[in-house]
Image (cartoon, helix red, strand yellow):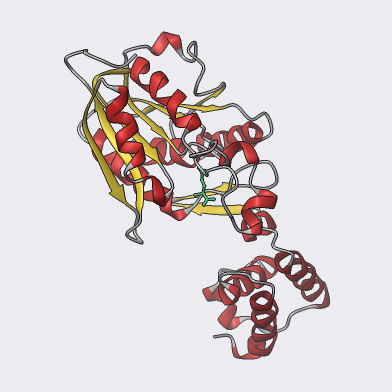
């Protein structure tokens, strides 16, 4: 703990706690690190806080207390090995989605140049992580929201500039029967963190007021978009190709049931996140070709 600034940080953390912020101390430290250009650990050797930095810190605290997401204030979100640019207009990637990427990479192990499609990519977190961690992967990232896709493009360009194989960014709707027709039957993996929050569910203010509604809400049971996604995935995947879909913790039975009912899928399974909550469903496109659409 940085002794010189312990009072400043303690006051800041108390203020954020009173405002209902979930991790007040960490957020206060990350904001102070942001304004001083340091890492959180680097705060320990921080001496003087000049007037400009103090004023910037105070202004950011005001916004955080007003429940603006921390990542919008720093402009960055950490996801696996990447730091992505985020801000108004794009869904902030969550740590629980990292496990879905872990599964995706494991399923692609040994495939030298897999064709991968990320449906509803937002910041590009899943697509860009796969491209970064599987250098042979040919990844296409699809996003329908014209505001969000600006962030996808920004992040894709900076990862390509950093040397990752470029991800193709495509404006499109994951439920569109014509989406990516040229890839029909040739895709090795379809992965998605679709909008799945049931309409009317209670979400934190950071989410309700700052994540794009289009990235969150999935109809009465949260699975409206997923229903459309299944048809697209079935069409795109080669026999034996993999599907991974994130879901809400209350959908760990409903989503696998939906996939089974759709037909044309083998090995339907559900997986927990690191907190042990049901988090994503996986399946393989049937090799027999029966069922599905
Ligand atoms: N997990 C997100 C949340 O808690 C929702 C993500 C989504 O709908 N894809 O807000």
Q: Does 234 sit left or right of 38 as displayed?
A: left
Q: Is residue 114 visible?
A: no
The spot of residue 238 in percent (x, y) is 27, 17
Dividing the picture into quadrants, the one containing residue 205 is bottom right
Is 191 placed left or right of 78 in the picture?
left
Residue drawn at x 65%, y 51% is 208
Q: Of residues 82 and 242, which is closer to you in this image?
A: 242
Q: Residue furthest left?
A: 288
Quarter of the figure that contains the C terminus: top left
Q: Which residue appears at 54% of the width and 34% of the height?
A: 156
- Please give the name of the residue rendered at 30% of the width and 17% of the height, measured from the top-left corner: 292
Residue 273 versus residue 178 in the image, above or below: below
Q: Is residue 98 above or below residue 173?
A: below
Side (left or right) of 42 relative to 117: right
Residue 7 shows up from this direction: yes
Please identify the residue farthest to the front as the structure is shown: 220
Q: Position of residue 92 (x, y in %)?
A: 57, 49
**Image height of 9 relative to 63, above or below:** below
108 relative position to 130: left or right: left
Q: Residue at x 35, y 56 (%)?
A: 277
Q: Nearer the viewer, residue 44 or 250?
A: 250
């Amino acid at each position: 703990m940085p002794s010189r600034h312990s009072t400043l940080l303690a006051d800041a953390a108390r203020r954020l706690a009173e405002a209902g912020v979930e991790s007040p101390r960490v957020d206060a430290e990350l904001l102070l690190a942001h304004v001083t250009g340091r890492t959180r650990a680097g705060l320990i050797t921080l001496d003087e806080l000049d007037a400009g930095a103090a004023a910037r810190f105070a202004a950011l605290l005001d916004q955080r207390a007003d429940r603006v997401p921390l990542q919008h204030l720093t402009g960055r979100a950490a996801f696996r090995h990447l730091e992505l640019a985020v801000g108004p207009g794009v869904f902030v990637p969550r740590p629980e989605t990292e496990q879905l990427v872990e599964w995706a990479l494991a399923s692609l192990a040994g495939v030298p140049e897999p064709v991968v499609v990320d449906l509803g990519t937002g910041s590009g977190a899943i697509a860009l992580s796969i491209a970064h961690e599987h250098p042979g992967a040919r990844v296409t990232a699809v996003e329908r929201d014209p505001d969000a896709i600006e962030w996808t493009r920004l992040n894709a360009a900076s990862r390509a500039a950093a040397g990752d194989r470029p991800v193709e960014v495509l404006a499109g709707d994951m439920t569109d029967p014509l989406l990516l027709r040229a890839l029909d039957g040739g895709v090795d993996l379809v992965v998605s963190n679709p909008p799945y929050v049931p309409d009317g569910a209670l979400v934190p203010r950071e989410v309700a007021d700052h994540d794009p509604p289009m990235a969150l809400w999935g109809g009465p049971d949260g699975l409206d978009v997923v229903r459309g996604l299944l048809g697209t995935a079935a069409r795109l995947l080669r026999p034996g190709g993999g599907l991974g879909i994130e879901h809400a913790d209350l959908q760990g039975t409903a989503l696998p049931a939906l996939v089974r009912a759709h037909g044309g899928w083998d090995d339907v399974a559900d997986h927990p996140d690191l907190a042990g909550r049901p988090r994503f469903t996986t399946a393989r496109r049937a090799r027999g070709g029966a069922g599905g659409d």
